[in-house]
Image (cartoon, helix red, strand yellow):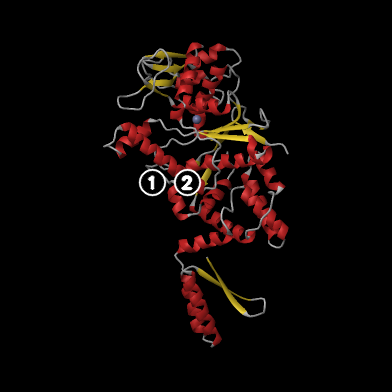
Amino acid sequence: MQLRLYDTLTRGKRPFVPLDPNHVRMYVCGPTVYDFAHIGNARPVIVFDVLFRLLRHVYGENHVKYVRNVTDVDDKINDRAARDYPGLPLNEAIRKVTEQTERQFHEDVDALGALRPTVEPRATEHIAEMRVLIEKLVADGFAYVAEDHVLFSPQAMNAANSGLPRYGALANRSLDEMIAGARVDVAPYKRDNTDFVLWKPAKPGEPSWPSPSGIAAPGRPGWHIECSAMAWKHLGEQFDIHGGGIDLVFPHHENELAQSCCAFHEARMANTWMHNGFLQVEGEKMSKSLGNFVTIRELLADWPGEVLRLNMLRTHYRSPIDWTLRGLEESARTLDDWYAVAADAVGDRPAEAIVEALSDDLNTAQAIAALHGLRNAAVSDEQARGTFAASLRFLGFLGQSAAEWKGRKQQASGIDPKWVEGLISDRAAARGRKDFKESDRIRDELAAKGVVLKDGKDADGKPVTTWELA
Ligand SMILES: [Zn+2]
């Protein structure tokens, strides 16, 4: 089966052909670690986890390398450290903030059923590689030193005319438009207002490192060069897939691409550029000022991570997604049903229909439609149940046993199963003495707590009552 992926750079769905099928390489921009991740941050985590699983399925588990970086040098981190730990030296405070946030991030994305990437490099551990790239760019005339800054010149890149991509190609903008549209309050050290920072001076007390040659004072890297350096170190000069949210296309990915292609004199950085669409909450842009800013952690207090995962995958990754309570409720009902039908069955391979749907540019909506069909077949067929369960696990579901899934829901509802069983036996006794008024009262008492009774017969024909949560 041919895997096809949409490439942002060439704006089309193209067959995916790895540079080396024994070593498929993917880079995804990871979190800046200063605060709890919001639900918008969960989208690339889940989307590229599904792609990682698919690539491992197609090329073999040990032939796929997935790199997701951690940005641990940033103004927002410095501000948070100064605010939260005013008594500590800034560097110590920064370490506390980044370590704690990274731990929270891991807990959150583990709960979403996302596999850990192969490597999670931290920016502060790759300063030497950044300096090498910056010095190459300066030596080749793509960047220049000015007032202790190093700046990249998109105009120099476009003037080079030597097999390099055009600056602006990824975002589909022309440099002339960008020059015209740039703000007038241009920094005095920039030759052109489209030039962007590769390296800058550190403020007093901020973390700093020895600067690239030509600058005596210590400094710190710009954000874009961090990813070029980490991708280079862990994946090489060129690799297969570069991913992230659509908000990263410009300027972050455009600049990464410019830096890497100019440093290595290559026409490409990644062969395929993939971007997931925006996330809205209840039809509105998520923002702190609108009060609809919701973290993964807050959602996990109310919903199992797999419900968030399913809710995310119901929409194709390139479409905008509207995150709603209604959607979450529906996803939760679906998973309750899937857990009950799969009933801990074991199967060795996911259904071909699932792999086929994902191979068409990660069509998760179609994969979920296929799951509904597999579910129906699984109700009455042992082998189909195995395939259904294996398909769910392939997509990152069924992380728990059916009993754990049901038990967690009971726990979350605060219902004590012993209390329910006690009332069921009281009700059986009332029915036995034909006191239907009392038996109805007990049923209503349970229903008020969300407990639904089902009367049936056991194998010997004796009446038996089971229960579940509405
Ligand atoms: Zn990046």
Give coordinates of residue 221: x percent, y percent.
Answer: 42, 24
In this orientation, which residue lies closer to the viewer: 348 or 268?
A: 348
Specify the amino acid type for callout 1: Gly
Residue 74 visible here = yes
Q: Is mark 2 within 8 Å of ligand 1?
A: no
- The residue under the point 31% across, 39% down is 84
Give coordinates of residue 265: x percent, y percent.
Answer: 58, 16
Q: Earlier in the sequence, mark 2 or mark 1?
A: 2
Give coordinates of residue 104: x percent, y percent.
Answer: 43, 44
Q: CA distance from mark 2 to mark 1?
A: 21 Å
Location of residue 269 (image quadrant): top right
The residue that mark 2 highlights is: 108
Helix, strand or loop under label 1? loop
- The residue under the point 40% across, 22% down is 183
Q: Are marks 2 and 1 in contact (CB under 8 Å)?
A: no
Judge whether 296 appears above or below 427 on screen. above
Helix, strand or loop under label 2? helix
